[in-house]
Image (cartoon, helix red, strand yellow):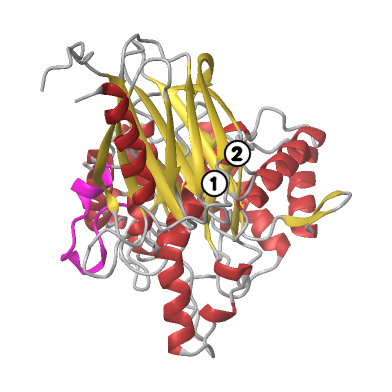
Amino acid sequence: MNLHRFRWLSCLACLLAGPLLTSAEEPLVLQFDFARTNGLIRALNGVNKGPLAPGGLLDLSTSQRELGIPLIRLHDCHWPNPDVVDIHVVFPDFNADPGRAESYDFRLTDEYLQAVRATGAQIVYRLGESIEHTTVKRFAHPPADADKWAAIALGVIRHYNEGWANGFYFDIRYWEIWNEPENRPAMWSGSDADYFRLYRAAAGAIKREFPHLQVGGPAVGASGNLTTSGFEPTDFVRHFLELCRTEHLPLDFFSWHCYTDDPLELVRRAQAIRRLLDENGFAHAESHLNEWNYLPDNSWAPLARDASADRRQACYAAMAGPPGAAFLTAALIELQSAPLDAANLFHGEAGSFGLFNEFGRPQKNYFALRAFDLLRDTPRAVTVVGGRPGELAAAAGLDQVAGRAGVLISNFSEARSKWRLEFQHLPWRGPTVVECRFVNAENDLELVRTEMLLPGDQALLLQLPRPSVALLQLRPGETPPENTGAK
């Protein structure tokens, strides 16, 4: 085939793959400069909850392993009837002796953590209880004895890190004290002072016995308000940091949450919280965004008790569908340059907010995280020019031997859909093979088409209407034989 005709047909096929374009629409340009590397693509694709779903009937281990999850936080595991991880589960009788192995019941939690570690992920162990949306709260209360609660926490650490009580050597680094103690009464029935008393006792005890471990919290759901003039932390956050500073309490990581419909809010909050920690003398403390997700229309109203079933279903469908997939991808790309040490999506299990439906089938948001992990197969980040912050995000990378390249694009909310992708300074000569995969209403990251870009014109026209995700995998192609004109 004539090479120029092959190139023209390739571009035509690419354009026809999406909705028809008006002739007046000029393509926007994204430039990828593979000669300008910029560190590594960071593994911010952690999740909450391990692969064993409630009831013992779903094991999502294979699918979670395929995401390359670096860090799994253990919170709300097996919710709404948690039977693993929580303090009341592993230490069912608070009157028992925390120094005796027989006071603990680790059996189900052992199985759960073994499955988590088998995915290849490290663990953030949340010491505390799961959320209780019910009218009656059974466990979301301050412990009657904070020092004894701290002693129980030490028993849990010994079991999973030092083999105590027929335990394990998981080397769990991060130990978090409670979750959202300002979220009342669903997560905490006590006062600020009650939580501060618990944190003082537990953080101090853990750090004294295990000085090499990282202890932190408070996993706040409400960290503060972003304003035009800066960031105003909540009274709870301000008083917590003051407590840790004045009493020299351990704070190896500060954890916080954000559910939003704006990917840039995650970035702005990460920047604000880093400044807040630094200003309060905690420059060493890591910042963990360890709950986040897409919240359609930035409103919890569709998920309230009085919301209609249709409204609730539509909200969860958007979260798990193409809008959620595009949001997650955009957020993971935008957060690459944010002052953030770890991130954990809520969550990686089945059901509402999760990556799988109740039957264990991966949803669109799962394939978004899969696309991000595949991008990390080319981990050397390269310079990208032409994105639209908060609307259209793009990232690209090279593998370690410069034999492959990857490009990930998320059109979360950009109305224009026609793009010209310019691949500059690819580290090989000759043609380039581009394999195109999409996450959208029709596609779940399967290979849709393969393009051949010829030397001297390594650009591609791409149709990417909102909301959707594109993963392009580039590699050297064989140089076609010279055209002799023979028929």
- Rendered view: 59 above or below 271: below
65 within the magenta span = yes
Instruction: Assess disc 1: are there few (<14), some (14-19) or many (≥20) residues with their C-alpha within 10 Å of its C-alpha.
Output: many
Find the magenta span and give its range.
49-66
In the picture as drawn, the residue positioned furthest to the left comes out as 487
Residue 106 in picture, x, y percent from top left: 27, 53
Asked if the residue at tag 2 contacts the one at tag 1, i.e. Cβ–Cβ closer than 8 Å, the answer is no
Which image quarter holds the C terminus? top left
Q: CA distance from mark 1 to mark 2?
A: 13 Å
Percent across and percent down for residue 408 are 43, 37
- Residue of label 1: 331
Circle 2 residues within 10 Å: few <14, some 14–19, many ≥20: some
Determine the residue positioned at 82% across, 35% down. Answer: 279
Q: Amino acid at mark 1?
A: Ala
Q: Is residue 61 visible?
A: yes
Which amino acid does the dot numbered 2 rest on? Gly
Q: Secondary structure at mark 2?
A: loop
In the image, residue 481 above or below residue 271: above
Q: Which residue is mark 2?
A: 387
Q: Is 246 within the magenta?
A: no
The quarter of the displayed image where residue 166 is located: top left
Foreground label between 1 and 2: 2
The image shows residue 55, relative to residue 420, as above or below, that is: below
Which quarter of the figure has residue 473? top left
Left or right position of 197 against 104: right
Residue 32, percent across and down? 51, 25
SS type, badge 1: helix
In the image: residue 188, left or right of residue 328: right
